[in-house]
Image (cartoon, rainbow, N blue to C red):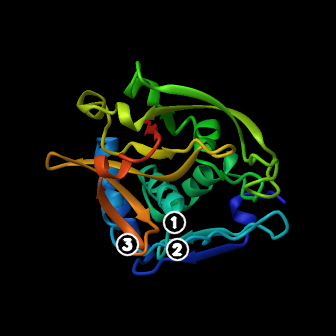
Amino acid sequence: MAAPINSMIEKVVLGKWTEERLDRLIAEGSGIADTGERIEFLSRQFLGTPYREGTLIGDAREQEVFVVNLHEVDCFTFLDYIEAMRLARSFGTFRENLARVRYRNGIVSYQTRNHFFTDWRQYNENFIDDVAGQVSPFWSRKVQKILNRKEDGTLFVKGIEPSARTLCYVPADTMDSKTLDTLRTGDYVGIYTDAPGLDVTHVGIFIRKDGRLYIRHASSLKQSRQVIDQDFGHYIAAKPGIMVFRPKA
């Protein structure tokens, strides 16, 4: 059952943080005028945060819980928290923004949760732009998919209806220096997949610093299992391509 944030069950796990520290962090971030640099500053504070999947609570049968877990993140909840923070001025407004970023129209329920990366483009267009076509006007590709439907007709996410969607991505093997120069610090990057029913297999934040390019992401790899900066070119080299969402100022 869908419900506004103030009437939902809530679970808050702040880990090393306190509300007071988060207030100070978010206030400092809000003073950074450039949107990408604000995202870089905020996300940098979470380097080393442990990786854990399945921190969200709720499914087709179990009531959705509004979860704020800054102690452990997966690749997508990491982006949820950073996007909500970059729009906030305090811990209180961060919490409100998180509901709008994670759920359609801020209505907290399993059915209205953004389960796929392109749900952000579909339902959060007031926050982000899909810029893959701008990043690479010549090489970018558009494909049609039925999201959430596997090749055998079963669902990736039970209880969520499949939906037709057009995906725009940049093939990794076309990303030369000119294309890379169009990416900006703070861009949200999804690793495109050819698999039927899915848009991406992983997400992270593009970071440009000290003349080098990185993807800042919550890595599930055994040797990492935390939020790390990883060489961007090396990371995407064997991947099919990337989708790029740019936060609006």
Tell me where residue 219 appears, x and y as whole percent: 42, 65
Q: Is residue 233 left or right of residue 62?
A: left
Quadrant of the snapshot with the N terminus: bottom right
Residue 122 visible in the shown view: yes
Q: Is residue 107 left or right of residue 78?
A: right
Residue 28 visible in the shown view: no
What is the residue that sits farthest to the left in this orientation?
210
Q: Viewer-nearest of labels 1 and 3?
A: 3
Q: Is residue 153 left or right of residue 174?
A: right
Q: Secondary structure at mark 3?
A: loop
Amino acid on which the number 1 mark rests in the picture: Asp
User: What residue is rendered at 32% in x and 36% in y?
Assistant: 183
Amino acid on which the number 2 mark rests in the picture: Arg
Residue named by callout 1: 74
Residue named by callout 2: 52
Q: Residue 10 sits in which quadrant?
A: bottom right
Question: In terms of sequence position, does the residue under pointer 2 or pointer 1 come before the other?
Answer: 2
Q: Are marks 2 and 1 in contact (CB under 8 Å)?
A: yes
Q: Secondary structure at mark 2?
A: loop
Question: In terms of sequence position, does the residue under pointer 1 or pointer 3 come before the other?
Answer: 1
Question: In terms of sequence position, does the residue under pointer 3 or pointer 2 come before the other?
Answer: 2
Residue named by callout 3: 224
Tell me where residue 66 appears, x and y as whole percent: 66, 67
Determine the CA span between mark 3 and mark 2.
Answer: 11 Å
